[in-house]
Amino acid sequence: MQNRITLGLKGDVNFIQSRLYNHPECVFPISISKDETSGSVTYIYFDPSDDIFILDQYVNVVAEYIIDRYENRLLRRILDENYPDFSSVSKREILKNIECFADDPEIGYSARKKAVLLSIYDYLKEDTTMLIDGFVAFRLKEYEELLTRLANRMTEQYVAQKEYTEFIDLLKYFVNIQQHRPAMVHIIVSPAGGYTLLDESGEDITARCFADFIDGEILLTEEAYDDLLISVLITLAPESISVHNSSSIKNSELFSTISLVFNGKITHCNGCEICKL
């Protein structure tokens, strides 16, 4: 057990000081002093005594402090190095996706914090004085590897979201330029998969609409039915859509896409006379 652990910090001293003093799990004593001869470094001293549990608490707070203070700038640096063609605005949007991976077992917050904790313990086996800036710059390789993977995943998600938005906008454009638009189309969702389409007068127009997209009588998979449905709806471009037997919908993503394309023009129902068909 080390007799004394010293942390040297530049800036944000009040932040970690308050963390150490106010953290609900930290009941250990610390002392703080300013060394005027070493620039603006403030030293925080901690005597773990013989209690390894107290040392674990202390290291845990230090790890949280490192993540809070440095993670965003490390991620930004990784994005600058690996994705130089992305604008600053795009990189800010990418960083907003970090919460989407908070619970990821490989790159989530817990995994990243564990990597920092292990690095701190490894360091304290060699030295009891840690300058945080230098530690982050040279002793967190595994943590930085996780951040690189996280940055790549966030970027992939950002690109996918952007492409999906552009896809929706394109579908909206095709809908808006259609002429001779029917007033209403009813979609009856089959529990077994597939869809029946009715026009505003209740006439079944399924075969006629689908015939424009398939050749002859072929056996369609559920995925093919989904693709056909959105293609038919884009071609028809109805003023409004009523979805019946909504509780039988299996592909919720498909109907989310339809809702985005036909924004405000879709109603859902589970009990009318058409639903009973």
Image (cartoon, helix red, strand yellow):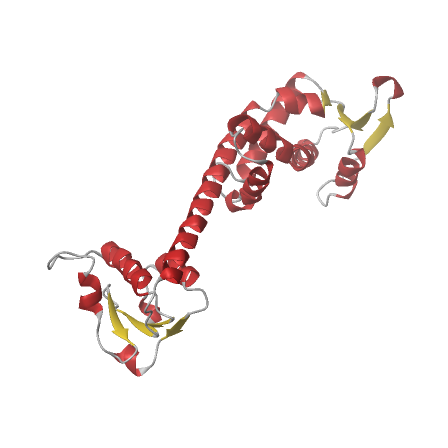
- Against 11, residue 122 (above or below) is above
Q: Is residue 274 left or right of residue 12?
A: left
Asked whether residue 1 appears in the rendered view, the answer is no
228 or 209: nearer the eye?
209
Residue at image coords 29%, 58%: 231
Q: Horizontal placement of 169 versus 194: left or right?
A: right
Q: Quadrant of the C terminus?
A: bottom left
267 left or right of 197?
right
| Left or right relative to 41: residue 209 | left
Q: Where residue 130 sits: x, y (%)?
A: 72, 22
* Residue 14: percent from left, percent from top: 81, 37
User: Residue at (23%, 77%) from the top-left corner?
Assistant: 203
Question: Which residue is situated farthest in the right direction here?
Answer: 36
Q: Which sits in the foreground, 226 or 146? A: 226
Residue 45 lies in quadrant: top right
User: Measured along the vertical axis of the image, is residue 178 above or below residue 46?
Assistant: below
Q: Can see residue 214?
A: yes
The quadrant where residue 114 appears: top right
Q: Identify which residue, 67 or 46, lies in the foreground.
A: 67
Question: Which image quadrant is residue 142 in?
Answer: top right
The image shows residue 41 at horizontal and vertical percentages of 81, 24
